[in-house]
Image: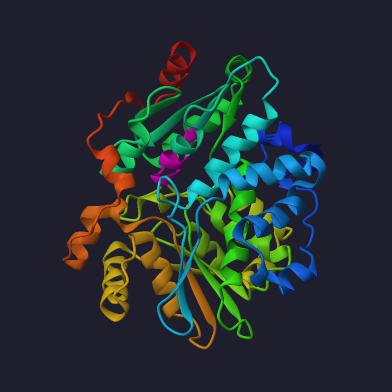
Amino acid sequence: MLYYSTNDFNNKVDLKEAVLSSLASDKGLYMPEVILPVDADILKNIELLSFQELSYEIASKLIGDNIPKSDLRRIINETINFDAPLVYLDDTLASLELWHGESMAFKDFGARFMSRLMNYFIRNENKEYTVLVATSGDTGGAVAAGFYNTPGIRVVILYPSGRVSEIQEKQLTTWGNNITAIEVSGSFDDCQALVKRAFLDTSLDKKLNLSSANSINIARLIPQTFYYFEAYKQIRDNTKPLIFAVPSGNFGNLTAGLIAKKMGLPVDYFVAATNINHVVPDYLTTGTFDPVPSRATISNAMDVGNPSNFTRILSLYGSTWNKIRKDIKGFWLDDDNTKKSMLEAYKKYHYITDPHGAIGFAACNCEDQNTNRVFLETAHPCKFLNVVEETLGITIEIPEKITSIMNKSKTAHQIENVYSELKDFLLTF
């Protein structure tokens, strides 16, 4: 299996190069040159497979012979070691809870898998790699947890000052050792632009051996396909059409779902659920992709005005708008309606959503109730403690995974939204 650049199908590399470099030489994003279907027997007997066994079968189709089977099984067993339960709210509406990992966000799947994959590829190399990542909230904590004390890798996380929750900030600024946090005076889009510029700086890239743990890295997307199949395994009545409502920011999660569909997962369609940063829902309506500066919301992990993975979605569908619209519908809410959705889920089902999951929940309510409607609950509600408690008028019990970090001291290097400041820091830290 080789991986092509979204800018040039003939620009292909093996998995090691795709993972370690993150971006293609022409600055495109990597995609598998062919998306192989899962074996028919896997889907037919899916309920007999454990989450780890199912993940291995899917990974083997996307990775091919890049990694020996025994090593791939070990990596899967080390990373897919927590559940992704489907929690039914009524007969046809369910929440896919993706927050049962270390940082209590769905990005634990991608970060843990990527850290083990990188460690495997550099195990015999006598040099250090720098993983550079921008976060709008949950990515930073997941990457920090996944890469902590990984030999040969140091991690630098950029996050927007004042635009992540207190718990999210603690999760990415309290590790030390090989994890460094940089607080940027700006938005997530600014952080992402700084990271992209660093990758375009060939002298810096060569000196630091840069790699990214954002969803631009194909290693993040591969394990995110796993839980779509795991959700299907748990569907009570698979004779009805299946719909996934996916809270979306940089659109890596939705792209992984589309890859799963291409592999044969029987999904009718997806709903791209966003906040007021609704550039993709607008595209689905108008056919025009018009990136804009992001705006801050209570669902901060989706505050993205120029989603990187949109280019992968275009590549999957040959940039054909009508084909994309058959598989993806758009939906968005502002903050007030997000809070109303949180209240509805709590009052009607006594289910607590975080602000991101609440938008997915609202999207499901707009679909045919005689279908299997699954919304992705991407983070534990406690990670957005103030807004959840104020909206619902309740006190949330905070899990020990979170309370254990709250008394730790924040350590972050502060910079302006200026590339020279980032470069100077990277060359001296």
Residue at 25% from the left image edge and 78% from the top image edge: 347
Q: Is residue 405 above or below residue 97?
A: above
- The magenta stretch spans residue 403: no
Residue at 26% from the left image edge and 72% from the top image edge: 343
Q: Position of residue 53 (x, y in %)?
A: 67, 57
Question: The C terminus is located in which quarter?
Answer: top left
Q: Position of residue 373 (x, y in %)?
A: 50, 77
Of 409 and 423, nearer the camera is 409
Residue 287: in sight, yes or no? no
Residue at 46% from the left image edge and 74% from the top image edge: 94
When asked about the image quadrant of residue 191, the answer is top left
Q: Is residue 158 above or below residue 301?
A: above
When asked about the image quadrant of residue 129, the answer is top right
Q: Position of residue 54 (x, y in %)?
A: 67, 60
Of 18 and 238, nearer the camera is 238
Query: Seen from this angle, which residue lies furthest bottom?
Result: 370
| Total numbered labels | 0
Q: Which residues are magenta?
A: 133-142
- Left or right, 264 with reference to 247: right
Question: The N terminus is located in which quarter?
Answer: top right
Q: Position of residue 90 (x, y in %)?
A: 42, 83
Of 310 and 175, nearer the camera is 175
- Left or right, 349 with reference to 367: left
Q: Is residue 276 above or below residue 95?
A: above
- The magenta stretch spans residue 141: yes
- Left or right, 147 with reference to 356: right
Residue 395: in sight, yes or no? yes
When asked about the image quadrant of residue 241, the answer is bottom right
Residue at 72% from the left image edge and 33% from the top image edge: 16
